[in-house]
Image: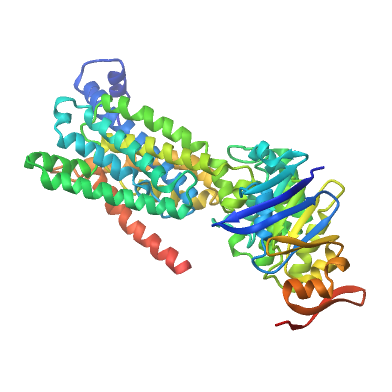
Amino acid sequence: MARLSSKNLSVQGNNVSILNEVSVTFGPEELVGVIGPNGAGKTTLLKSLLGLLKPSSGDITLDGKTLGSWGRIDIAKRIGYLAQGAPCHWPMTVERIVEIGCSPHSLPLWGIDAEDRKIVENALRLTGISHLRDRIVTSLSGGERTLVMIARCLAGRAEILLADEPVTGLDPRHQIKVIQTLLSSVTKNTGVVMVLHDLSLAARYCTRLILIHEGRVTAEGDPTSVLTPKNLSDVYGIDASLREIDGQALVVCKDIRI
Amino acid sequence: MIPVGVIHEAFAEFDTAYGVIIRELRLPRAILAMAIGAGLGVAGAALQGLLRNPLAEPGLIGVSGTAALGAVIAFYSGLSVTFPFALPAGGMIGALISVVLLYMLAGRDPSVLTLILAGVAISALAGALTTLALNLSPNPYAAFEIFFWLMGSLADRSLNHVALAVPFITVGIVLLMTTGPSLDALTLGEDVAQSLGVRLSGLQARVIIGTALAVGASVSVAGVIGFVGLVVPHLLRHAVGQSPSRLLIVSAPGGAALTLAADTAVRFLTNGPELHLGVLTALIGAPFFLGLVLKIRREG
C-alpha cells in the first residue's frame, strides 16, 4: 500500500511561482479528483509527485521516504502515470502498448514472459478492450486510446495512478466508461488521482476533491464541502451550485461573474 | 558461388592466388561491409527511436559529417601520408568531438528539438570546414583524393582496417542494443517513459555515444556511406510491428545484408572505374528519402 504525499511543495517555472506550499496526501481505496481552472497548477502537481519536475522547496514523500531517495524504477513500480492526450508516437498494436506497461517489472529482449502475459490479458479484460488487441493504437478514437493507456497503467501494477485529464475531449459515453474503469481499479491496495474539468463528473464519482487555484489548495474534502457556491464563485468566477437530480450530482452553472 | 576448394585454400593458409585474393582482398571487404552496415542500420534505428522521427539518420546529429571532417584534416595535414592510420584515427576523433559539441549545445537534459537543431548546426559547420579544406588544398591531388574518399568506398581495405574499425563498431552496436526497452517506453512520450522508469539523460547518452562509436569508426575507414540508417529501419519497421526495441535487433543483420549486397553490386555494375559504394547508397537512398517525406506529408 503506497502513500504519496507532498508537504509545503512549491514549484517555480521561469521564475514564476506555479505551485505554492501545496500539501496533499494520496493513498489507496479512493478516487481523488484534482480540480481547478486552467493554469492552476494541476498538471505541475502530478508531474512533481512523479519526480518529473524539481520542486523549488518542500518535500515529496513516497511511503515515508523522500521521493529523491527512490530509484526511477522503484517509483515506476509504485506510481503509474496517464498522460494528457494519451500520446503514442509509433503506430503500434494495442497489445504491444499494454505489454510496454510491464517494463518497470521486467525488461525482456523480445517478448514478455508467461506471468506478464497473464497480467496483460487481465488488463485488456478489465478495461474492456480485448477485442481491440490487434488494432493500431494511433487509428483508435480518443476514448479507446485512453482505455488502452489505462490498460497499460494496470499492466504496470502501480499502487497509485495519477491520471491527467483522462476524460477531456471524450464523448459522454466514453467519459463515463473511462471514469468507471478508473473507479473499478480502486481497491484496498490501490488508489487513483484524476485531474478533470467536468465538475459534475467530479462530484458524482470522486470520493475526495482537491480544489487548486493559482498554485494553492483552496479547498479539500468530500464533493459537497468543496463544490460550494462560494468556492465556485471565488475560484472559477461562476455563479453555480451543486444540485442533485434523480440521485445524481450535478453542478449547475447559471452565469459567469464579472 | 565460390567453390569449396577455394575456401579450403584460403583458410588453410595456402599461398595460392585464390587464397591471397580471398584472405587479403575479399574477406576484409566483406567483414567491413557487414560491420559498417550493421552499425549504420542500428544507429539509424536508435536515433529514430530517440527522436521519434522516421527521418532521423546518423548524419542528422552531425556524427558522419564531423567524422569525415576529422579524416579530411588527417588527409590535408599530410599526416596520413606519414602515418596511414592517422586517417581512421582522425575520423574517430571527429565523431567524438561532434558528440561533445552536441552535449555542450544541447545541455545535460536536451529536448528532442534542441538535439535536432544542435545536430543540424554541427553538420553545417563540419560540411563548411570540409569544403574549406578542399578549397584551400595546395595540392590538387590531395583535394582529388579527399573528394574521392568522401564518396565512401570499401575498395582496397585491409585486415588492418578491420582491426581498427570493427571493435569500435561492435561496442557501439552493443551499447545501442541496450536502449531497446527504453526506446519502446519513449513511444508514449518523454513524461510517460520517465514514469515507466526510464532515465532520459542516460538513454540519450547511450544512444549518442553508441552512434558516435559505430558511425565514427565506419566513416573513418570507409568514408560517408549514407542512407543505410534510413532505408534499413524503414524496410523492417512494419515487419516488427513498429516496436523500436525489435527494430534495433533486426536492423543489425538487415544493415549488414544490405551493405554487403550493395558493395557486391558496385564491384560488378561497371566495367571501368569502380562505382563508389557511397554513391550507390545515395542514388538509392535519396529518392527513397524523398518518397518517405512525401508519404509523411500526405499522412499529415
Q: Is residue B220 above or below residue B239?
A: above
- The image quadrant that residue B77 belongs to is top left
Whole-percent x and y of residue A193? 76, 56
Q: Is residue B162 above or below residue A150?
A: above
Q: Is residue B136 above or below residue B221?
A: below
Q: Residue furthest bottom?
A: A255
Image quarter hosting the N terminus of chain B: top left
Q: Residue furthest right?
A: A247
Q: Is residue B102 above or below residue B221?
A: below
On the question of residue A96 being in view, the answer is yes
Camera-side residue: A62 or B210? A62
Camera-side residue: A57 or A182? A57
Whole-percent x and y of residue A248? 89, 73
Name the residue located 56 percent from the left edge and 49 percent from the top edge. Answer: B186
Name the residue located 61 percent from the left edge and 50 percent from the top edge. Answer: A53
Give the colour scheme shown: rainbow
Q: How many marks?
A: 0
Q: Judge from the rendering whether residue A30 lies leftward or rightward of residue B266; answer left or right.
A: right
Camera-side residue: B48 or A248? A248
